[in-house]
Amino acid sequence: MYVEPFTVYRKSAALRIQPIPPRIGVSNGKTFVEKAGAFFIEIAPSNGTRSYDWTKKKVFAATALEMITLFADIKGKGEFRATHDPGAGGPNKGKTIKWLGVKRMDTGGGIGFTIGEKVSGVSTNENVVVGGYDLALLKAMCDPTIPYLYAWPQSMVGGIHPVETKDNVTQSVQIDTSPDASIPEPH
């Protein structure tokens, strides 16, 4: 299932956020969530009037818990930070560190988003300031999406049905949303 990204364009950069569905697996005829979905966040710098260089974007995949914490922290203490090590648990541990920082600005009611990365000791980042109403709209869109990142609605209505690609990799789920869909009986 494809969901149109939430995008905010500003003079200095653009912010794009899109939910990514969970990865569903099959073992012994039973389906399960291999990996929960996430919110894919991108910031691309401006390269002119109403033009953005998406080849220079910074990306961060925020978990559902991180997004809930982001909204709570911005409302409370005014800032949020999450850090990921994509190589954690493997031979590339610590080689690349990514972070997402979000901070309520002191003036104008804006919210600053920063995505950065440190690769081989060199740090780079992109940032953009969005309006408070943009954040409110984003929260209104994220809240009902969170259960889908864990495949809860899919498992309650018609079960989880993996969709396999030509190379037999499960990518997404189908959701039975027909009016006559029923909740499966417990076994």
Image (cartoon, rainbow, N blue to C red):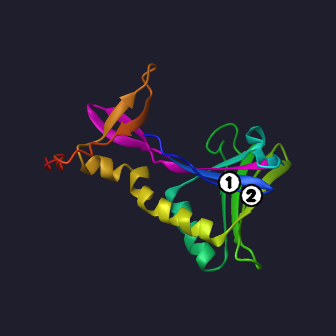
Tag shown at residue 31? none
Q: Earlier in the sequence, mark 2 or mark 1?
A: 2
Q: Residue at 30%, 41% (x, y): give it.
A: 160
Label 2 sits on a secondary structure element that is loop
Predominant secondary structure in magenta? strand
Residue 146 image position (x, y, % from top left): 44, 57
Q: Is residue 65 above or below residue 98?
A: below
Decide if residue 94 is in sight here.
Answer: no
Q: Dot 2, how many residues are within 10 Å of its Cα: few (below 14), some (14-19), or many (20+)?
A: some
Task: State the quadrant of the N terminus.
Answer: top left
Residue 84 image position (x, y, % from top left): 65, 52
Question: Which numbered mark, 2 or 1, is in the foreground of this view?
Answer: 2
Q: Residue at 31%, 42% (x, y): give it.
A: 175
Real-space CA distance between mark 2 and mark 1, rounded to the nearest whole angstrom? 8 Å
Nearer-the-camera pick, 86 or 15: 15
Residue labelled with disc 2? 10
Residue 54 image position (x, y, % from top left): 73, 41
The three-letter code of the residue at mark 2 reads Arg
In this picture, residue 183 sits left or right of residue 149: left
In this picture, residue 104 sits left or right of residue 123: left
Residue labelled with disc 1? 15
In this picture, residue 59 sits left or right of residue 186: right
Q: Is residue 13 above or below residue 162?
A: below
The three-letter code of the residue at mark 1 reads Leu
